[in-house]
Amino acid sequence: MKALKFTVAALAASAAFAGVAVARDQIQIAGSSTVLPYASIVAEAFGENTDFPTPVVESGGSGAGRKKLCEGVGENTIDIANSSSRIKQSDIDACAANGVQEIQEVRIGYDGIVFASDIKGPEYAFTPADWHAALAAKVVKDGQLVDNPYKAWNEIRAELPAQPILAFIPGTKHGTREVFDEKVIIAGCEENGTLEAHKAASSGDEKAAEKACMALRTDGVSVDIDGDYTETLARIEANKNGIGVFGLSFYQNNTDKLRVATMNGVTPSVETIASGEYPVSRPLYFYVKNAHLDVIPGLQEYVEFFVSDEMAGPDGPLAAYGLVSDPELAKTQEAVKARKPLGALN
Amino acid sequence: MTDVSVVAERGKVSQPKSILAIDARTRRRHAAEARFRLMGKIAVAISILALVGLLASILTNGLTSFRQTYVTLDIYLDPAKLDKQGNRDPEAIAKITTFAYAPLIQKALTDAMAAKGIAVEGVNAKRAVELISKEAPATLRQYVISDPAVIGETISFDLLASGRIDGYYKGRVTKESAQLDRNISPEQLLLADELKQAGLLATRFNWDFFTAPDASDTRPEAAGLGVAVLGSAYMMLIVLVLSLPLGVAASIYLEEFAPQNRFTDLIEVNIANLAAVPSIVFGILGLAVFINFAGLPQSAPVVGGLVLTLMTLPTIIIATRAALKAVPRSIRDAALGVGASKMQSVFHHVLPLAMPGILTGTIIGLAHALGETAPLLLIGMVAFVRDYPAGPPEGFFDPASALPVQVYSWTQRGDPAFVERASGAIIVLLVFLVAMNLTAIILRRRFERRW
């Protein structure tokens, strides 16, 4: 009995102790590892140029970040979630259930996804159809849906180099994989007519056909990388035939080791992605908990600083690092000033 | 007759042999032993090779991070740019951002190049200033804010060279690779060589690596271990202060006072089990109990310290109990025999004799905790933290990083210069671990008694 009382007292004491200490004065951010470099560049500049402390930026993935954001309102929850994919209705529902009512969506720019191989290897000029034919479990050959028979790139299209197919693609936990599936694999599936064949096989069910398109071969030709781009780079250095999927900024930091492939004849760059010529890109976001805006010092200033022309504009440090700046940045700046919360998802 | 023939037959089968002659069975047994010895040697050789390979790769990659390239420039702190009102008002000066400081550096570099007669074709002023780290304007700004009176003077600064230039003098970047690199050109490297000849650029020991905070992906040259070292130190302090008294008290009670019954047996088994629980489990526990329930702040050393305390406690309890057990019964009996109480016998005689063993166990437990990353992942310590935590005890609640966490996050960065930083951080971590283990060995050698 005495011991129990003591334990309770100790717990109460530690809780009181904690209560004093939680007056947090720095911004807490978590989420996407793709947004992390940009967020840390902004955090660094923000800490340098203002009286506010430098925000703390955690990585851990887009989904994990949004989940953390929706844990509730209070100083032991995060203020901002970085995300490389758009928030889902399930996240918004989870937020609402935990009392997080108003969330702001801030689009910071676009990220290009590039295909690159060893610098000493041959040049590649891809189309999405090539990638689908190389990696899909089932392809159309002579009018029939068959198990993928291709071993080398030139078997798919004679203009491609005679290199064995080996692709390092992001694992399914990455936000990048979603974009890869959607903009490359499904687009390619449609292009080379496999989608039609799948549709015919599943008697016109579009959803099932798309799902069949995304089924990738499992004979070791397509390798999922669950780590980050440094791991993909290490794999390519160990296996010179491999082609990896990278973010544009990572490629731009390693141009002496990687040769980038064109897609539909367009070389990826900040300009071609901004103009929409290069097809594989996606918007990057962060989500702000409005309830914290007047509680955590500097939060409103940080959000405005992030989307300011000096940071996220076309001549800012983020663009220099590989972020494709948003042509509608001015709109975002206004929305941020007005603290416009996210409405229902369409 | 038959008997004789039997004997003769037997004699044929087992002829009396000299003990010096080796028969087939002995030979087989010796061969087995030789094989085992060989396998043992191979095993040792493989582990030594692995260790040497690991150390060699870390040292070759990481030792260069202890040196850094700097550019020395005389910079005129132009009042027209930094203090437009001319009244040296600290608040107005604090409003001037680093963007205003960058042109001053560019001008100083152009002037210095003109004075020394350095010019490289294809490198204009804008390309030339890329040789200097993006951290430099921040360095300048901090200097000016700390003492606004220097505005208007010309002051000599040691500014960090950019990561690629630094890499050039460490062999990571070559003229060939620069040809393909969009962040640096061979002409810029040529300019760096010229600056070096003119004495404006030098590579020297890098104290900042140990004291500076982390830096973002665009400034690998500025990244340091300062916040991580402080964070690790705070956590170790918390672990030591909490786990040593708790662990020792618990083991003394269990070993010397507790009655032998089912309940204590259960506790004993569970302590052994707890020592084998994967560390990430403690992270989950920490998140649930300390952050979500008790409301302690995220990314704070106090939570990290508490989690690591839980992780280290079983190790310390097991080591302490072993040390207490090793003290012979006769010591206790003698103490009790001259009229000491049970408690006196333990605290005056048994505990001092067991102390070297306890300390060894504690230090090894601490070393284990120092190298732990997994539980910290869940409590938000794997983060980009740039501000130093305050002094203890308030600093325990400020966000901080930790040494192994810094290694982990640097290996994920895009710029190749961070590979060197990560290896450098591993070396620092290894030095700490070796030092701790050496202390443990010395303590044991000097103070341990054998009975």
Image (spheres, helix red, strand yellow):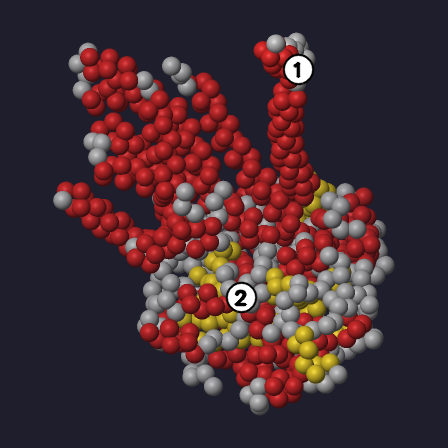
Q: Residue furthest left?
A: A1
* Residue B67 placement, left or right of B190: left
Alpha-carbon distance for marks 2 and 1?
77 Å
**Closer to us: A248 or A181:** A181
* Residue A29 placement, left or right of A232: left
Query: Quadrant location of residue B448?
Result: top left
Vertical position of residue A206 compared to residue A26: above or below: below
Q: Residue at x 72, y 62 (%)?
A: A242
Vertical position of residue B296 compared to residue A35: above or below: above
Residue that badge 2 annotates: A173
- Residue A50, given in percent of the width and then of the height, sits at 49, 61
- Residue A39, given in percent of the width and then of the height, sits at 54, 64
- Please, what is the three-letter code of the amino acid marked with disc 2? Lys
**Which of label 2 and label 1 is nearer to you?**
1
Q: Residue at x 32, y 54 (%)?
A: B289
* Residue A68 placement, left or right of A220: left
- Residue A78, given in percent of the width and then of the height, sits at 41, 63
Q: Residue at x 52, y 35 (%)?
A: B432
Q: Is residue B56 visible?
A: yes
Secondary structure beneath label 1: helix
Vertical position of residue B420 compared to residue A210: above or below: above
- Please, what is the three-letter code of the amino acid marked with disc 1? Lys
Are discs 2 and 1 located on one and the same chain? no
Q: Residue at x 28, y 39 (%)?
A: B267
- Disc 2 residue crowd, few under 14, some 14–19, many 20+, Cα 10 Å: some
Q: Residue furthest front?
A: B1
Quarter of the picture containing the N terminus of chain B is: top right
Vertical position of residue B398 compared to residue B446: above or below: below
Residue that badge 1 annotates: B12
